[in-house]
Amino acid sequence: MTNLLVAANPRGGAPYRFGAADASEVVAAADRLRAAQPDWAARPVAERAALLDRWCEALRRGRSDIVAALTEDTGRALLSEAELDGAMHRIDYWSRSAPSLLAERSRGVSESVPSVRFEHRRDPLGLVGVISPWNFPLLLLLIDAVPALAAGCSVLAKPSEHTPRFVEPLMEAVGAVPEIARVFDCVRGGPQTGMAVTGVTDALCFTGSVATGRTVGARAGARLVPAFLELGGKDPLVVLAHADVEVAATITLRGSVVATGQACQSIERVYVHETLYKPFVDRLVAAASAVTTNIDRVDRGHLGPFIDPSQADRVEAQMTDALARGATLHCGELIRRDGGAWCTPVVLTGVHHGMLLYRQETFGPVLPVMPFANDDEAVQLANDSEFGLSAAVLGEQSHALSVARRLRAGAVSINDAGLTAQVGDVEKESYGVSGVGRSRMGASGLLRFLRRQALLIQTAPAAPLEAFGEG
Ligand code: NAD
């Protein structure tokens, strides 16, 4: 039976009611998709790529409805446009690269048994479950779904219950390409629907919090199906001695507060060489103080609201804890509640790693800044976290590289921040609790959905039992 769920409107507008798929509906969708997958996989990859292009065209035609729904879901207009562009770019990328990636033939002669020739065949994993979060609802669903489809899998997606509106126009675009509609479907709902998806798919892609990632990973482990987990971050940014202070402050601000800090690769900790500390904090505070929210008009201002209202409470609790433990607030409005919840960039000094905002992911526009004396101290501070998603180092390039190589982070941007949000063709794998499994970026983003089957051809007479006997 379908439960009714309600998603809040992050700008305080009308809430949205929708039916959550129950376990039997999830099983029925999975059965349909699994049954259609072999035909999809049997199509030449160029044909699958052409169908993905047609889907992209349908998304383009549905642009105004998709952007309108995403804007209602997330409370931000321009980023919703950018999100759709990013998603279409991913489809284009995979439809162009899949044919050459899948054309690669690996065959040869075994070094360990020279009479054996081998070749590899790539077999799609089957039905892939994609469970996604609310911060970039469309992009983070398609980022895994599209390469899985290109690889020949079918996909059952479960987007976040906080951002359900975009699913209707998305599925309309899917319906325009019946071949894709047979192998791609979305079920809406909360954790229970997500749990049902983890019970029926042949592989799982999960993007979300560490806590849910542990549950999803345990479930995949119990069923012995592969899981690719993309989890939270606590990204550090290091400003080395001799960095340009003005440029560093500009990069730091953007890297931390874009999307109101609701991005996994947001900068959440800033470490500055002590010789630059004072001028850097001054510049950062000046730039941060000029940042505006879109509270008055959805398509004006730099920062949208918190998408999930409970996220604002978490950010507030971290700031309250930091201030109670002696942090200095230089700028920023704590949380402004006016229908939704907004926050202008917060710069804090007098901070230390015992504070909540260093131990937990923040997911808000909060910039705690700390000085360091030398590279060793910068590396020790940056690595003092259970997370290891990404990081940034600003300074003279070879110096920055030498520091970056010592960081426990899946990707390090040098003289920029958050480049992983723009660079989709370079592989990266997380450290610590930030993720498990092969890279979703670069070639492995597609190849991880294919099992390599080895065909081993004996060209000499096969050994008899005696060859393995005791004497
Ligand atoms: P979340 O873990 O609360 O939820 C993510 C998804 O999991 C949702 O669809 C939710 O309904 C589903 N879910 C919840 N419980 C489940 C269960 N028991 N079984 C199966 N599915 C379940 O995360 P969120 O709050 O939606 O997203 C924010 C988090 O996502 C942050 O931690 C952020 O860092 C992370 N994130 C990571 C990346 C990345 O690429 N590493 C990208 C974006 C966001």
Image: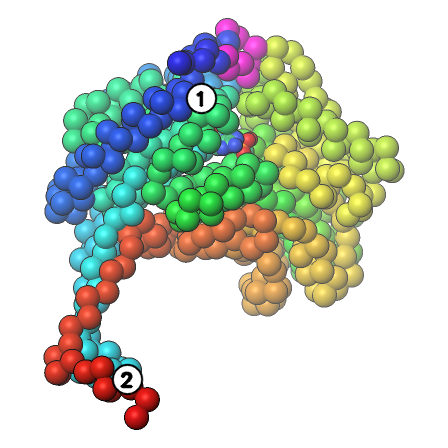
**Is residue 22 in sight in this rendering?**
yes
Q: Quadrant of residue 105?
A: bottom left
Q: Label 2's element? A: helix
Residue marked by disc 2:
468
Q: Which mark is residue 376?
A: none
Residue 157 included in the magenta stretch of the image:
no
> How many C-alpha atoms fall within 10 Å of the one at disc 2: few (<14), some, or many (≥20)?
few
Is the CB of the residue bearing disc 1 within 8 angstroms of ligand 1? yes
Q: Which residues are magenta?
A: 6-14
Q: Quadrant of the N terminus?
A: top left
**In the picture provided, is 436 more to the left or to the right than 285?**
left
Image position, residue 439 (x, y; %):
42, 52
- Figure coloring: rainbow
Task: Identify the residue at horizontal 87%, vertical 38% (top origin).
Answer: 326
Give how far apart the Cα atoms at labels 2 and 1 are: 57 Å
User: Upstream in the sequence, badge 2 or badge 1?
Assistant: 1
Residue 11 included in the magenta stretch of the image:
yes
Q: Nearer the viewer, residue 115 or 11?
A: 115
Image position, residue 291 (x, y; %):
63, 28
**In the picture provided, is 236 more to the left or to the right than 183?**
right
Task: Identify the residue at horizontal 69%, vertical 18% (top origin).
Answer: 336
The amino acid type of the residue labelled 1 equals Gly
Q: Label 1's element? A: loop
